[in-house]
Amino acid sequence: MRPIYFYAPSLKRYENEYFTSRSGWKAISVTGTYCAFNCKHCNRRVLETMADGSTREKFEKEISTAKGGVIISGGSTPRGDVPVWKYSDILRSRKDLTIIAHTGVVKNEEIARKFKESGVKIALLDMVGDNETIREVLGQPFTVDDYLNSFKYLKKEGIKIVPHVIMGLSKKGEEGDLNAIRLLKEVNPDAVIIVGLMPLVGTAYNEISPPPPSHLINGLKLARDLFNVPVMLGCARPLGSKYSEVEKFAVDYEVDGIAFPEENTIEYAKEKGRKVILSNACCSNVVYDFILRVSL
């Protein structure tokens, strides 16, 4: 039976008997709260939860306290990418850190190379499985192929790619979300992270219903069935007592890890005989945790 990794970066306050997020990897936005797009499910609200690295002075201050690794994020430019490389010299100087970056849409090899030259080790990008959702929910002039090509460009540069699929996002319903997972077979991901749509105050989706637990379970099941690489239940997902069955399923179905697990999920995993490994890293670091485990 494979071990299970539980992650708690400092993206939110989290604490239980087992561990806390107080010393977790931090997320820094290189654009502050700016983004060229106004996605209905985000409306830049997610950027507000990150440390502000919009100026060089602010970025240097924030990254100076980072230990182990850091999540570099931000809003997209009109071209689609997140301009992480504007601080490439600072990032390259921190060889002690694992640099994880939200890349946005990467339109060509040159942009992918900029991420590589900035020291990015792991690239994160949501995978969307239909053009209607990209156009009407994200408000972007891109296509499914643009998203798939983003992963291909990044992987060609030797960057680990870890797509996220947001269950509940697709205009085509659950089947649209499942299709996004199936499409990832084309890009040979290094890990797959399943998350869930959350109604955020201040967004157009403030009153939308989050996906039911079965929707997330079906996403995890399909990803586990399709991929031999690590599959994770990520941090951005609806929580509450009715979603505890999602975490229990993840334990039972050999999913590799969970971000911000309920305390009783950790106990359940131990009862089921899975070796529990606790980490303050971003859950996408499961790529390196997995490599380390299989090499021992």
Image (cartoon, rainbow, N blue to C red):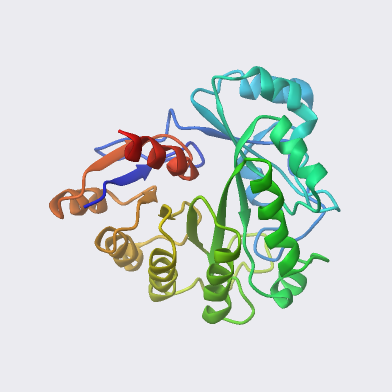
Q: Residue visible at 29% across and 39% down? A: 277
At which x and y percent is residue 101?
A: 63, 40
In the displayed structure image, the side of residue 267 where residue 141 appears, left or right: right
Seen at 77% across and 33% down, the residue is 85
Left or right: residue 189 compared with residue 115: left
Asked if residue 197 can be seen in this view, the reply is: no
Q: Nearer the viewer, residue 241 or 223?
A: 223
Tell me residue 269's x, y (percent): 21, 52
In terms of image quadrants, where is residue 131?
bottom right
Q: Which residue is depicted at the point 63% across and 50% down?
A: 46
Which is more toward the observer, 166 or 145? Answer: 145
Q: Is residue 174 visible?
A: yes
Where does the image place residue 227, in percent across and percent down from the top left? 44, 61
Image quarter of residue 176 = bottom right
Furthest residue toward right: 78
Taking the image as shown, residue 116 lies to the left or right of residue 279, namely right
Q: Quadrant of the C terminus?
A: top left
Q: Tell me where residue 168 sits by quadrant.
A: bottom right
Residue 142 percent location from the top left of the image = 79, 65
